[in-house]
Image (cartoon, rainbow, N blue to C red):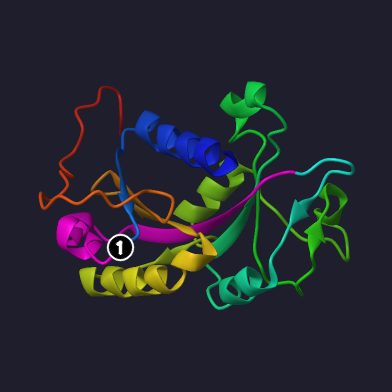
Amino acid sequence: MNEYWTSRAIEEYFENEGYNVVAVPNSQRVEHLVPFDHLFVGRRVKVFGLQYKRLYPNPDHWRLKEEQHRQMKLHDWIYYALSGVRSVREHRNALHLLQLTRSDFPHRSQLRPDDLGSNPGQIGYARWGGFVQGLFGCIFGWQIQSPKEALAVLGIARDLAKALIDLYFVARDARVVIRVSPFIADVGGDEPFDLSPREQKGVD
């Protein structure tokens, strides 16, 4: 359930920031149901991927899979989302307890909290607030330039479906976030998703 709590917290974050958030299944129908042209009313569109990892106890650690790690290293805009949630009671703090890290280190079967940090030999990480700042800057994510590139990313997403990676398209000018997820069942339907701006007050 950690992927649900984390992904829902991310959706709520962007909704509170005034974005229209749409979550869709990772399937071939997505490119027909999502009007990607709408995302490019401006130039600021970023995409990033998350591989969710739950925290295991005794001692605290996250388990990494070698094939997932190998696939992630092919795309530097996909990150480990290391949950710090220990119980259902903490799910409302899922973003506060989240640590995000790149996959640019040799595979290991486990990561422990003391493996993360800024000291030599440790793996750098970001909390959610710092990650979003870096996303809107030039540190995290991949800035895509056209609907054609967005469709190319969807092709990558289908290749990564077995690795259970969520993709997020964040369009700052259109105020839209699209989450493409293998955790969402494809229940059919042919109506395109509505990406029209939400009515917000006090949102720049």
Decide whether residue 63 is among the magenta residues.
no
Q: Using the rendered view, name the quadrant where residue 74 is placed.
A: bottom right
Residue 145 seen anywhere in this rendered image of the structure: no
Three-letter amino acid code of the residue under disc 1: Ser
Q: Is residue 70 left or right of residue 12?
A: right
The stretch of residues the image draws in magenta is 27-55
Q: Residue at x 45, y 34 (%)?
A: 13
Describe the element under mark 1 as helix, strand or loop. loop
Please identify the quarter of the rendering in which residue 27 is found.
Answer: bottom left
Q: Does residue 89 lie above or below 134 as drawn?
A: above
- State whether residue 28 is above or below residue 57: below
Q: Position of residue 25 (x, y in %)?
A: 33, 54
Can the viewer see residue 90 in this picture? yes
Q: Is residue 138 above or below residue 71?
A: above
Horizontal and vertical percent position of residue 180: 36, 55
Q: Residue at x 89, y 44 (%)?
A: 59
- Quarter of the image with the C terminus is top left
Circle 1 sits on which residue? Answer: 27
- Disc 1 crowd rating (10 Å Cα; few below 14, some 14-19, many 20+) is some
> Residue furthest toward the left?
191
Q: Is residue 40 rendered magenta in the image?
A: yes
Of 101 and 190, the residue lying toward us: 190
Q: Position of residue 99 (x, y in %)?
A: 67, 46
- Left or right placement of residue 99 versus residue 204 in this view: right
- Tag count: 1
Give residue 177's position: percent from left, percent from top: 33, 47
Q: Residue at x 63, y 76 (%)?
A: 70
